[in-house]
Image (spheres, rainbow, N blue to C red):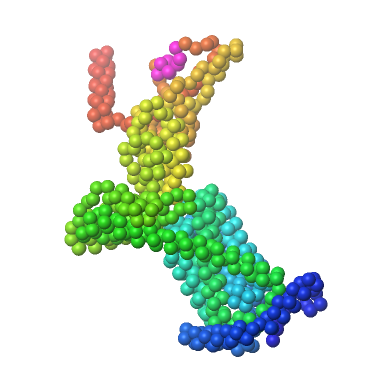
Amino acid sequence: MPDARLPGQPGPGEGRPFPQQEEDKGRLNEMWRNRPQWVRRGEAVFHLMRIKFARAILLPQLTPDLAFDLRQTVRKEGQLTRGYILMCALAAGIATLGLLQSSTAVVIGAMLVSPLMSPIAAMGFGFASLDGHRIRDAIKVVAIGAGIGILTGMLLTWLSPIRNATPEILARTEPNLLDLAVALFSGIAGGYSTVIGKGGTAIGVAIATALMPPLTVIGYGIGVFQPMFAMGALLLFLTNLAAITFAFAVIARLSGAARPLGRVELTPRYIAILIAAFLALATPLSMTLMKLSNEARIRTAARSAIVEACGNQGVTVAQLDVKTSVFGAPTVDALVIARNYTTNAAEQAEGLIRQTLGENVEINLQQVLAADVQAQTRAMVDAAMERTAAGIAADVPPFQTIRQAIGLPTRSLWTDRAQRMVYAEPVPAPGWTLADYRAVEQQATKAVSGWTVRLVPPPQPNLTVLLRQGAAAGDGQDAPKPPENAISTDLAVWTLTRWGMSKVSLSGADEPALTILSKQLSDAGIAAHIIAPTTETEASMRPKAQTAGAEPPMVATIGIYAQSPSQEAAAKAAAEKAAAEKAETAAQAE
């Protein structure tokens, strides 16, 4: 029974192939009809094995009529419609908002409206039937849905005031073994539900969970100009898509839902489409499997090396994460619980791994001391809770890379893992300006991915802010220059923010100019107390020598340090003494 055509497809007298295509098709079909006897016997053996295996895994065996009806149903449901486009956009929008606010419940809710299962089922059935035409049509529908998901994620990222890399986003920037297993099991469940015709909605949620969030993360990576995020999420999406599609194909073939091999349309064009589609899906899947195999090899060697470097006795590797990069050396983040602290254990472990694997592996090792079993158990639970609260798969920032990017000795480094920020306080460098520290902060942030560097410049008692440039007198002479230590307003705001200042004092300029500066600081969350200038202070701030008619630059002074308790007490005593002297003078005058 031939597969019936769908609306919009060419009929018997429409879209006839060229004579060369008819000749090639006839030649291939003739070769298939005249296949050797051993090939026919192999087909029979494969058919019997397929039926036995399908029964063993509780798969139903469909009759030819039921299989034909199922193929037509899957094909119709996988077509491109306006509803499919709308639901893809809505699902991607909800998923993007859920990822930005790191809400797992919202992300799962978005999957309830995602329609990606239908075209993927059509593509899987196309692979099972070796039908290049169906594969081509299904790929178009999946590609359109993927493009809508990426564009929606990119647009909402641009519009959103919150663009932090949340744990939900970071979890989808690179494939791992668990993601691949989820996709594979979801595909098997989706194929089974399609064959038996039950539970498709619930299974579709699981399939969409493995596909739609990576698509929106691709859009997020493009929106925030993080190509590594986008490329990692793209690899995750293609890997999951390949695993789900191949799972659908296997279930369709085992259940007898696929078209019999004897009625496969063997034309060079469709064979080329079939091979191209297979390579497009198999390539990312093989890349992921190679990556996971390499990480497993490094994980085994790293575990042995770390235990040996820490002394073997009473050493427990509580957590161990491996990251591989195309452009850099692999990194291992490990948490070790031991009875004694081992100096330079990370360097020793790196040397042992270098001897075992023959490659350089960077190890970030954290040692937790625990004397007995109860203390070790408590340490493991605390470490797990810390990682859960931070919500990240690897919570150790690349300190070595950050130090190299800063290029200065650092007094301290500390992290805010929930916000993925690293704060660095360098030693005061001779001749360095605040603008230099800000430029180094930007350079360090670009040197690391997934983390934001905040550089805390050395403190100063006050800041001189340039409010207005000077004006020349008009006789050809240059305008008066501002003080050498004067900085711009935005640099002053950056400095105060890095120092964590919430309240400062303003002086040194007229009150309207100080009011404008106070408003700019208030917008940054910094309260400012304006000290109105007196006649004496105005005279002292005015340049002693200036060209007639020239207008000097206007600067303001931001006071950083508040009065100490002893200074406040001395000022209070001086005010009381002045008030008493004034009262005494007034009494004598009377």
Q: Is residue 138 left or right of residue 188?
A: right
Measured from the top left, where is residue 107 in percent x and y?
49, 64
**Quarter of the image with the C terminus in it:** top left
| Vertical arrangement, residue 127 with respect to residue 526, above or below | below
Residue appearing at x 48%, y 26% in the figure? 466
Is 581 situated left or right of 446 in this image?
A: left
The x, y position of residue 377, in whole percent, is 24, 63
Of 110 and 523, nearer the camera is 110
Q: Residue 9: which quarter of the image? A: bottom right
Q: Position of residue 58 (x, y in %)?
A: 48, 85
Of residues 426 and 572, the one drawn nearer to the viewer in this rendering: 426
Q: Is residue 389 above or below residue 60?
A: above
The quarter in which the N terminus is drawn is bottom right
| Magenta region includes residue 303 | no
Q: Most prominent secondary structure in the magenta stretch?
A: helix
Q: Which residues are magenta?
A: 537-544
Residue plotted at (39% across, 50% down): 360
Front in this rendered view, residue 579 or 529: 529
Relative placement, left or right, of 8 versus 430 is right
Left or right of 34? Residue 289 is left
